Amino acid sequence: MLGEKTAILAYLKKLRASDPSRLWRLTGVAVGSAVSMAAAIAVVPGRTGLDLGSETVVEHLGTPTISIHRSDERPFIREGRVLSGETLGSALVRLGMSDTRLASQANTQSFIRQLAGAHSPGALITVATTATGELHSASMARQGSNIVHILEAYDGKLRVSSRTEQLEARIHLQGGVVRSSLFAAMDASGLPDSVAEDLSKIFGDDIDFHTDLRRGDRFSVIYEIYYYKGIPIRTGKIQAAEFINQGTRHSAYLFPHPDGSEDYYNEEGKSHKQGFLRSPLEFSRISSGFSMREHPIFGNWREHKGVDYAAPHGTAVKATSDGTIEFVGKQSGYGNFVVLRHRNAYTTAYGHLSHFAEGLKPGNQVSQGEVIGYVGSTGWATGPHLHYEFRINDVHQDPLTVRLPEAQALSGAALRSFREQISSLSIRLSQAQESKTAAID
């Protein structure tokens, strides 16, 4: 410190001889610096110096008084959810409606039928009233639906109408790490149940989630959620997903085709969808296979050119692959019969149906898994079952053993368009793994 002072004084002495005016300017700076140093040196550890007192002030703020005139014509809007065990009438009263007669009308069976379940617990309900509680209108939106029911009062009677609302689609990004089970990981990461189920279906052919899953497997998914007035109403489709199972990465991206159909493909453009479903029914048992058998009605031995699936009357029958309806109607012993033509000379046939899906006509396009009819016992049948046939170039094959063709992969312009579309999605999937994951112990 003394060395610094000596240097400053020597410099000032020299400056005095050469430039007196500059001397006085720098002298002020030097004095200020010296005072600062003195102040710093004056602080002695362990000494408090100037004691500054402190005081705590607590002030209670009251709720401001709001004055509402009974003549105020502006609507007062209250919004909430229908509570479990709550009637529609009580929900309207809770949210500001004062007319108990209208509330009673809202609870009648005839009125409830018009709502088609829109008043179920969890439904979003918005009530607009006057200052005195007279109903302007109320709207109800059930979770998972974009149909909004409007309630209004006319001449003392409650009336209902409905309209379709345009929902706002928002993209959500979620990632997780598996420590026990797939659905435990998805629950912990906040993934909606419907998205979790879709994710397991998409990767179901690549991963056996009962036997192949390992601790440390990772997943990320980009999906839609639809909102009404800022409140989530229902989930949409998965846009992209990846699952890293035992170090192997599996990817899936939703790609729209020019005809309006959509499918999931991996990064190489290979479809995640099977070419054909092995069975057109979800729950059934095989009552007769592809073989020679004694006919249950005529008693003679003849070739059975399909597989019979026993199932309750009315069970939904699904198309086993994308195709075009070639025949729909009654045909001999088949009863109500549907024939679908698929690509590359494949056809499938569905017999003994009780009835057909609504609007089914020759030439219509159907998608894999789409319901085309219902199990019955029409034609030569002794009980409700589905007769299913699989043909290649019109030659019958055993549906249980035939090698099913794979779904067609993308190529050419479609593949180029697909690769352009997934580039940004692939980056976002990687970000989900790095920034937002959930671990399950």
Image (cartoon, helix red, strand yellow):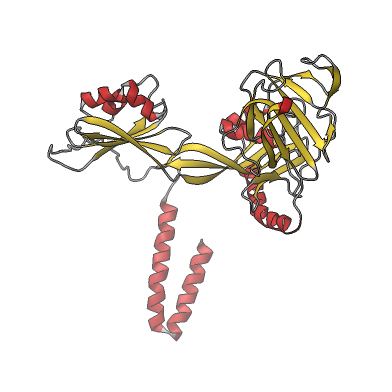
| Between 431 and 78, the one nearer to me in the picture | 78
Q: Residue 333 appears in which quarter of the rendering?
A: top right
| Between 176 and 381, the one nearer to me in the picture | 381
Residue 245's place in the image compared with 120, above or below, is below
Q: Check the image and name the residue furthest to the bottom.
A: 18
**Callout count:** 0
Residue 391's place in the image compared with 109, above or below, is below
Q: Position of residue 172 (x, y in %)?
A: 55, 43
Residue 384's place in the image compared with 277, above or below, is above
| Between 328 and 8, the one nearer to me in the picture | 328
- The C terminus - image quarter: top right
Q: Residue 301 appears in which quarter of the rendering?
A: top right
Q: Position of residue 288 (x, y in %)?
A: 79, 19
The residue at 69%/23% (across/down) is 379
The residue at 52%/41% (across/down) is 225
Q: Residue 334 appears in which quarter of the rendering?
A: top right
Left or right: 331, with 59 as reference point: right
User: In the rendered image, is residue 323 in sight?
Assistant: yes
Left or right: 29, with 317 as reference point: left
